Image (tube, coloured by chain):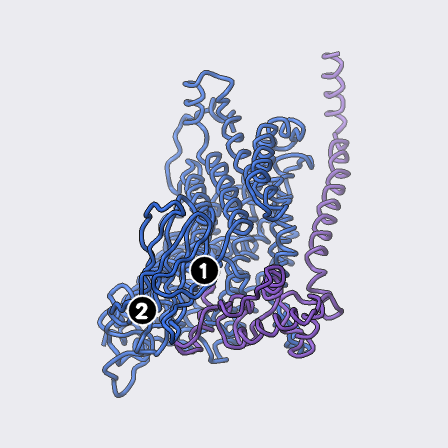
Chain colours: A blue, B purple
């Protein structure tokens, strides 16, 4: 019964989405306020029915109702409650349900909080949002229905893919989807602006919070997925240039570019046409990401869908939305008025440079990901595009961006002083030079480029600090005055500095772990030892440990410093899932500061020895810590007074503090 | 996100060993280092986008042993790669060779940058020539007022 309620609610949601997609547009064209005002309530109602439908599916999972095919295929009554709940989206059908849930949620938020939006823009944007919702709801109902029943209900389910039985599943897909789907709002607003043929700087201010939320969640989602792969897959890699990873990186790159170009549009009224294009591209790349992962084009653990009908349906959605949006853009964008002149050396100029490198990097990832597919389809030739390609192309495009990053915030709007900015960055350059020298002094035969990488990371971080120091004049005015200036700085200025600092932190982690990480591969017997960096691990033996729906064979290792100090034990394991006759590697991690010892276990040999892979990963946690700092930076920017949605504007603006900007 | 490697893991039963096994390692550290860097350039063809250095699949094990045998026999790095391409096709290389059928792949990143720079330069130049024209488009009354202001100041 519950499954049928869910099924029916989804159909009703589709009906509402169709109304929401049609009436407000008609209203906006004929200037009928009654028709336009339909958009808001239907968006909220559509969300309510999608939420009901999703809740029904979740209820089937929690109660282990194996008469529902989707639950039978992806769940098991022995799984802990958390995994029964998260396995709702650990499969194709359920993850599409999560997709439309978040889509409808964003639509409802626009309807509920977009009270200060122009009526026409709001009606058009919500209508476009409804087209996307209707397309995906139709996709679910016709090709990926999660509510199908089995006539003879089995007693037990087939269990969730063991690799997915991890806390990572609880947050990684939802965060990624909030990111992907969040860009749909920017897309809808862009289409609405094109439909209306009118756009102004305020557009950027309305869209910016949505882009920020999407970008923050995507940043955290990608970083979380990277950490999950790092500890789950057993060989300590954190980024593989896998097509599925690239699918999430492309919207991130386009979204980062959008975030920056929207600033120019909001502050200076320039780059309007370009910003609209980026808004379209960011969501288009999210759709392509969904297609790559969901269609089975890439045979991987993510491509649960093996049914080509699904691939063709998503491809049709892709063609209709991306093709339609770009055609509309080509037709209507010339009508939009350009504005805001600026000199090449200026804050705007720096942000254009940022956009240039980000879009080129994005294009590189795009061609590297899709080229093998296209080549095989056209000529039948099979080639591989792997990490060596991306390291040779993406990295050279990203380095100049990082080098230029500290200059941007120090340049003035309209006409900047490059020499002045360079002078203010001298301190950062000196600190970076010290870092490079220290790198050379401390490394023993590591790569020559590594200390320069460290130097660049330090330059980026110090540049962010100098930005704040300059704005607060901390070294030039009394400390109390600087503190007052700091409190008066716009939150978005803090956000910029914090997020840029986070990039430096991530870069430092990547450089350190790539250049100075070490690895030991060995077979050990009980009583044997392995040495790595300053640590010595002794193998105490193997033992069995039962879990709720798996068995662990655990290796126990005692970790000491080389001088004999006891640090603790590490217990990596091989985890076998009887329900699927599969095994996973559960690596053991020991944190030392921001570095980690990483130990994974092979299957025991007949002679009693155990193959192990042991890594020392210096500063590795900085990679994800940096992403967390970027997230916080985004949050600070989001809390900026001028972006708070629906917040009443204070009558007296604090004019004195505006000068600091 | 990259749980693709888990796919490899799942295809196999629980009998696989770890990637790069201890008995594979060569005694000559220089040769072993070369073997490791070559392994990172070679694809495990039964896996999804995984190098043979990372993969636990039996095929990856065989290829690692093969690479080391060729190195011990005195092959250069290029010879090893050529040997594997002759056997398994270009699919085995994670870094696609620069050839006609990959020209668009390798050419796109620099081309995108070039086109981007040219587009920006063009827009800047067009704007640059547009700005003075706008400034010159003053009405006669404005011209008179401007010259009066300038005179008063001077």
- Disc 1 crowd, CA 10 A, few/some/many (<14, 14-19, 20+): many
Of A296 and A455, the residue lying toward us:
A455
Of A398 and B26, the residue lying toward us:
B26
Mark 1 against mark 2, which lies toward the viewer? 2
User: Mark 1 touching mark 2, by CB under 8 A?
Assistant: no
- A220 versus A317 height, above or below: above
Residue position for label 1: A129
Q: What label sits on residue A553 in the rendered view?
A: 2
> Which is nearer the N-term, disc 1 or disc 2?
1
Q: Residue furthest bottom?
A: A152
Q: Quadrant of the C terminus of chain B?
A: top right
A255 relative to A574 in the view: left or right: right
The location of residue A643, given as percent across then percent down, is: 43, 40
Q: Is residue A334 visible?
A: yes
- The mark tally for this picture is 2
- B10 versus A558 height, above or below: below
- A148 versus A36 height, above or below: below
A304 relative to A355 in the view: left or right: left
Question: Which chain is indicated by disc 2?
Answer: A
The location of residue B129, given as percent across then percent down, is: 77, 38
Of A566 and A272, the residue lying toward us:
A566
Report helix, strand or loop for mark 2. Answer: strand
Identify the residue shown where x is 72% and y is 49%. Answer: B119
Q: Is residue A320 visible?
A: no
The location of residue A185, given as percent across then percent down, is: 46, 54
Q: Quadrant of the N terminus of chain B?
A: bottom left
Work out how far the residue at label 1 is from the one at label 2, CA to CA, in angstroms: 50 Å
């Amino acid at each position: 019964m519950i499954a049928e309620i869910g099924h029916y609610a989804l159909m009703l949601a589709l009906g509402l989405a169709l109304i929401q997609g049609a009436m407000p547009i008609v209203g906006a064209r004929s200037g009928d306020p009654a028709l336009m005002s339909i958009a808001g309530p239907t968006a909220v109602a559509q969300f309510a029915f999608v939420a009901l439908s999703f809740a029904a599916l979740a209820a089937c999972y929690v109660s282990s109702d194996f008469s529902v095919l989707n639950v039978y295929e992806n769940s098991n009554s022995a799984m802990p409650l958390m995994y029964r709940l998260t396995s709702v989206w650990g499969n194709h059908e359920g993850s599409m349900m999560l997709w439309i849930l978040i889509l409808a949620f964003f639509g409802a938020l626009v309807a509920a909080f977009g009270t200060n939006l122009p009526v026409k823009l709001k009606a058009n944007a919500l209508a476009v949002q409804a087209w996307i919702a209707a397309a995906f709801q139709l996709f679910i109902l016709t090709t990926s229905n999660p509510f199908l029943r089995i006539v003879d209900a089995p007693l037990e389910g087939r269990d969730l893919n063991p690799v997915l039985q991890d806390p990572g599943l609880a947050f990684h897909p939802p965060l990624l989807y909030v990111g992907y789907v969040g860009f749909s709002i920017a897309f809808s607003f862009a289409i609405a602006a094109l439909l209306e043929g009118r756009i102004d700087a305020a557009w950027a201010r309305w869209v910016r919070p949505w882009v920020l939320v999407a970008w923050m969640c995507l940043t955290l989602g990608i970083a979380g997925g990277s950490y999950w792969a790092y500890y789950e897959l057993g060989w300590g890699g954190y980024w593989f240039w896998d097509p599925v990873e690239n699918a999430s990186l492309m919207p991130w790159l386009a979204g980062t570019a959008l975030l920056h170009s929207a600033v120019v549009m909001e502050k200076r009224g320039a780059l309007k046409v370009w910003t609209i294009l980026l808004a379209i591209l960011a969501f288009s790349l999210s759709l392509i990401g969904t297609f790559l992962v969901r269609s089975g084009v890439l045979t991987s653990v993510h491509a649960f869908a093996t049914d080509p009908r699904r691939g063709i349906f998503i491809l049709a959605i892709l063609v209709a939305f991306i093709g339609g949006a770009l055609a509309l853009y080509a037709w209507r964008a010339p009508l939009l008025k350009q504005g805001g002149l600026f000199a090449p050396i200026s804050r705007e100029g720096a942000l254009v440079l940022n956009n240039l490198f980000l879009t080129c990097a994005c294009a590189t990832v795009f061609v590297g990901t899709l080229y093998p597919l296209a080549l095989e389809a056209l000529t039948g030739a099979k080639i591989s595009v792997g990490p060596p390609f991306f390291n040779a192309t993406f990295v050279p495009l990203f380095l100049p961006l990082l080098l230029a990053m500290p200059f941007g915030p120090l340049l003035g709007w309209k006409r900047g002083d490059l020499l002045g900015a360079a002078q203010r960055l001298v301190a950062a350059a000196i600190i970076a030079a010290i870092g490079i020298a220290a790198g050379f002094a401390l490394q023993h035969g590591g790569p020559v480029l590594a200390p320069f990488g460290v130097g660049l990371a330090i330059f980026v971080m110090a540049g962010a600090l100098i930005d704040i120091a300059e704005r607060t004049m901390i070294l030039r005015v009394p400390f109390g005055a600087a503190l007052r200036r700091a409190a008066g700085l716009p939150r978005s200025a803090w956000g910029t500095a914090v997020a840029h600092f986070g990039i430096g932190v991530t870069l430092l982690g990547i450089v350190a772990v790539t250049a100075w990480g070490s690895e030991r591969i060995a077979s050990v017997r009980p009583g044997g030892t392995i040495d790595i960096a300053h640590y010595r691990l002794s193998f105490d033996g193997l033992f069995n440990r039962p879990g709720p729906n798996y068995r662990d064979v655990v290796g126990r290792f005692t970790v000491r410093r080389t001088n004999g100090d006891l640090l603790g034990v590490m217990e990596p394991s091989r985890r076998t899932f009887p329900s699927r006759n599969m095994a996973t590697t559960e690596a053991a991690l020991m944190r030392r500061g921001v570095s980690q010892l990483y130990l994974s276990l092979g299957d025991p040999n007949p002679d009693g020895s155990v193959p192990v892979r042991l890594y020392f990963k210096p500063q590795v946690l900085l990679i994800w810590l940096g992403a967390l700092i970027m997230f916080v930076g985004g949050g600070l920017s989001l809390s900026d007074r001028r972006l708070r949605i629906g917040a009443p504007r204070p009558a007296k603006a604090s004019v004195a503090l505006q000068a600091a900007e | 996100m990259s749980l693709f490697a888990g796919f490899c893991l799942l295809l196999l039963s629980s009998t696989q060993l770890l990637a790069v096994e201890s008995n594979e390692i060569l005694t000559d550290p220089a040769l072993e280092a070369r073997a490791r860097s070559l392994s990172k350039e070679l694809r495990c063809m039964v896996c999804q986008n995984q190098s043979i250095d990372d993969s636990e699949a039996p095929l990856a094990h065989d290829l690692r042993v093969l690479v080391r045998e060729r190195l011990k026999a005195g092959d250069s790095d290029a010879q090893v790669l050529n040997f594997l391409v002759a056997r398994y096709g270009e699919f085995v290389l994670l870094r696609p060779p620069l050839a006609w059928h990959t020209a668009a792949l390798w050419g796109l990143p620099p081309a995108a940058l070039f086109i981007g720079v040219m587009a920006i330069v063009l827009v800047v130049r067009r704007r640059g020539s547009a700005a003075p024209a706008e400034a010159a488009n003053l009405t006669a009354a404005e011209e008179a007022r401007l010259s009066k202001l300038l005179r008063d100041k001077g």
